[in-house]
Image (cartoon, helix red, strand yellow):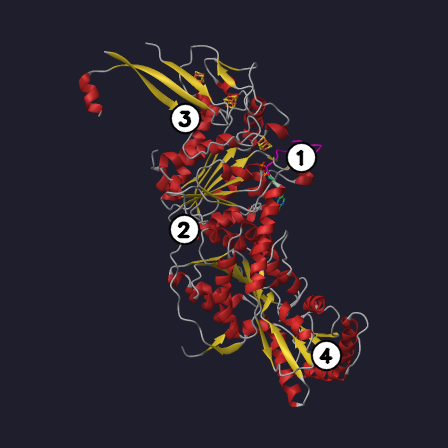
Amino acid sequence: MVEAKTEVIYQRPESFTDVHTHYCPGCTHGVAHRLVAEVIDEMGLREKTIGVAPVGCSVFAYNYFEMDFVEAAHGRAPAMATGIKRVLPDNTVFTYQGDGDLASIGIAEIMHAAGRGENLTVIFINNAIYGMTGGQMAPTTLPGMKTTSSPYGRDVELAGYPLKMAELLAQMEGSGYIVRRSLHDASNIRKAKKAIRLAFEAQERGLGFSMVELLSSCPTNWSMSAQEALGFVEEKMLPVYPLGDYKVTPALQELRV
Amino acid sequence: MAKELLKGNEAFAEAAIRAGVEAFFGYPITPSTEFLEHMARRMPKLGRAFVQAESEVAAINMVYGAACTGKRVMTASSSPGVSLMMEGISYIAGTEVPAVIVNVMRGGPGLGNIAPSQGDYYQMIKGGGHGDYFPIVLAPATVQEAVDYISLAFDLAEKYLSIVHVVVDGNMGQMMEPAELPPMREISDEIPEWAVRGAKDRDPNILTSIYIDPEDEEITNLRLLRRWKEVEKNEVRFQEYQMDNPEILVIGFGTAGRVASSAVRDARAEGIPVGLLRPITLAPFPEGRLEELCDQVQRILVVEMNSGMMLDDVQKIVKGKVPVEFYGRLGGVTPLPDEILDEIRRVSKNEGEISGDPRDEWMDRLEKMRTGDQ
Amino acid sequence: MAVTGWIEVDDLYCKGCGLCVDACPQDVLRLDMERLTPKGYHPAQMTEETCTGCGICAVVCPDAAITVYRKTPQRQSRKAAGRRT
Ligand SMILES: Cc1ncc(C[n+]2csc(CCOP(=O)(O)OP(=O)(O)O)c2C)c(N)n1
Ligand code: SF4
Ligand code: SF4
Ligand code: SF4
């Protein structure tokens, strides 16, 4: 007998609210949000998760996740998350931060959270620019890249070089899982999701600080179409920010998800 | 319980522990460091959270996070450290979560020195951080009082979802003084309904200080102001000394108030009709009481360890009804009882109005005294 | 037997960014230029019947606007069905 079974291959994650996001069309912030929500659903963590939103375009992340959330000061999400996790060690705590937030104003907080091995998960959106304030240079801006505050292109003699956070944080003994992934196409998005899963698994297993750096697009401030922006990630960002596993603690290496 | 001989900072820290503080986040700075060191010794043993943060910026943001869970949390620092905390303090105020901050004030501005000072009066009382908010400020004058008021600070913070600053100075932080600690209080297992602990069997809680629509921010500002009005109505605290028909009123807080009380006692012994008003809550200021006293006294002398910051508030309340004079030491210098006694004697002979800013004459007197000193 | 799939695009979320259109390996998606969502975007829509239900469009969609369904024809014996329960 031949029957046809209808499967739902994909649907909106339960950990999402029914809210239209404020992100620009085609901005991969939305993809990153969705992956986090999917992982939290799959691991059944929603009811014990506390998210920490940053200052940046994702400042309103708390409106989109169906879970407890706090909103940090610019760059301080890892400190705020530390405060939460230290008094609620059994809860799942994650921060979601942009590159200005994490790699510039909040670099002390992120380095020390990793240094202390805080059992937190950090989702780090590297879009090489300050999105929310209208496209200024970020510490992650590519050499030569034009922004509103590097109008002639980032001159490394004057403005220095991009900060490579995954590489830096992997140096910390307290780090359990530090990887870089990209959101520029479906297969990379799938890999990014797996990484986010492992990062949360690391936290659930008490394996220390975990961070997934996600190369992300900002079509608006790069003045590109959504599709062109993904091309920019692939062609221009990947060579500067190689994808890879920068630190995977042995206990995680064996884990299959 | 019997009195113990305790070092100020350690007594304050232990008082917080007895009051049920569940997390301490701090960064070393003289003259408050023993507070952090005491917490480092005690908190882990009690299974409570202690983190030596990478900076005061991080420390206050850890306090912010932990406060959002509805647990009792605090930090302690000293002036330059508290300056760094102002960002987090403003966020905590805007999010309306309770937190207690102890400031063991030292001489400034800048790196200044580590000597006792009251130079942070404006920063503490007027807010310090950005935006419209109203911290409660307690200014104890003895180790015992600080011990008692640290407990109260947590209660007030929770009752009014407010920042509570406890301001002391290096004198009190370093002083060995007998004090009685309260018994260890059980940690409350009550969870405030706003706390973030995971959205299980309820809608998510969101704690934020953003109100992107100015109308919403205005509503929030008004809510904070209304709450502050309640604080003003219910929580004014002060102490009076030698208030038997005083003609001269000395006003001083903290260490300056304590030194002034010896001077007032000695002046009374000389037959000078002088009394002391020592505000314990600097915010809310004992405004009503001072207004009443304006009708009873002929002259007021404000004594501070700064350039006359509370003086401004006093003058605003006195509204010229009574002449107000000032005596202060600055930069980490603590006035001696005799200096204040001399001032009381001088003021008792003065009559008539004071022309202009009372600080002008005081500066001249102080400079003369200083050159005479040498 | 052919695997058939289809998708639904939720107007509440779709921002007409076109990323799904570009990503679809079957080239069955277009932005509907005749229609605007309540937020004022031209939403994505299916224009051909040859969707395989691969889910790629949903994976790249930044707004979780797409639900993907697949009809899988399968041989099913009563015994096998019984074992599944
Ligand atoms: C203390 C402070 N300084 C500056 C700002 C202004 N500001 C808001 S967002 C932002 C940059 C955000 O960029 P990024 O972290 O890269 O996030 P994105 O917007 O690109 O997602 C800045 C500088 C602020 N809110 N607070
Ligand atoms: S400004 Fe850039 S980062 Fe921000 S939402 Fe728009 S596209 Fe995304
Ligand atoms: S990717 Fe999503 S938001 Fe963009 S057009 Fe397709 S359905 Fe709409
Ligand atoms: S499920 Fe696959 S084939 Fe169908 S529309 Fe989406 S991308 Fe195209």
Q: Is residue A153 magenta?
A: yes
The number of numbered badges drawn on the structure is: 4
Q: Is residue C72 left or right of residue C62?
A: left
For label 4, the SS is loop
Amino acid on which disc 2 is placed = Leu
Q: Nearer the viewer, mark 3 or mark 1?
A: 3
Asked whether the residues under the numbered discs 3 and 1 touch, taking CB atoms below 8 Å apart as contact, a structural biologist would say no
What secondary structure is found at the residue carrying circle 2? loop
Q: Which residue is mark 2?
A: A88
Task: Give how far apart the Cα atoms at labels 4 and 1 are.
Answer: 69 Å
Q: Can I make out residue C71 in this image?
A: yes
Marks 2/1 same chain: yes
Going from the N terminus, do you reach mark 3 or mark 2 first? Answer: 3
- List the single residue furthest toward the left: C79
Q: Earlier in the sequence, mark 2 or mark 1?
A: 2
Asked whether B13 falls inside the magenta stretch, the response is: no
* Dot 1: chain letter: A
Relative depth, front residue between B310 and A238 = B310
- Position of residue A131 relative to residue B314, above or below, is above
Q: Are marks 3 and 1 on the same chain?
A: yes
Which residues make up the magenta segment?
A140-154
Q: Which mark is residue A11?
A: 3
Mark 3: amino acid? Gln
Q: Report helix, strand or loop for mark 1.
A: loop
Q: CA distance from mark 2 to mark 1?
A: 43 Å
Question: Badge 4 is on which residue?
Answer: B298
| Left or right: residue B57 compared with residue B193 | right
Three-letter code, disc 4: Gln
Question: Chain under label 3?
Answer: A
**Residue at image mark 1:** A154
| Residue displayed at 45% across by 13% down | C26
Residue B125 placement (x, y as % from top left)? 63, 62
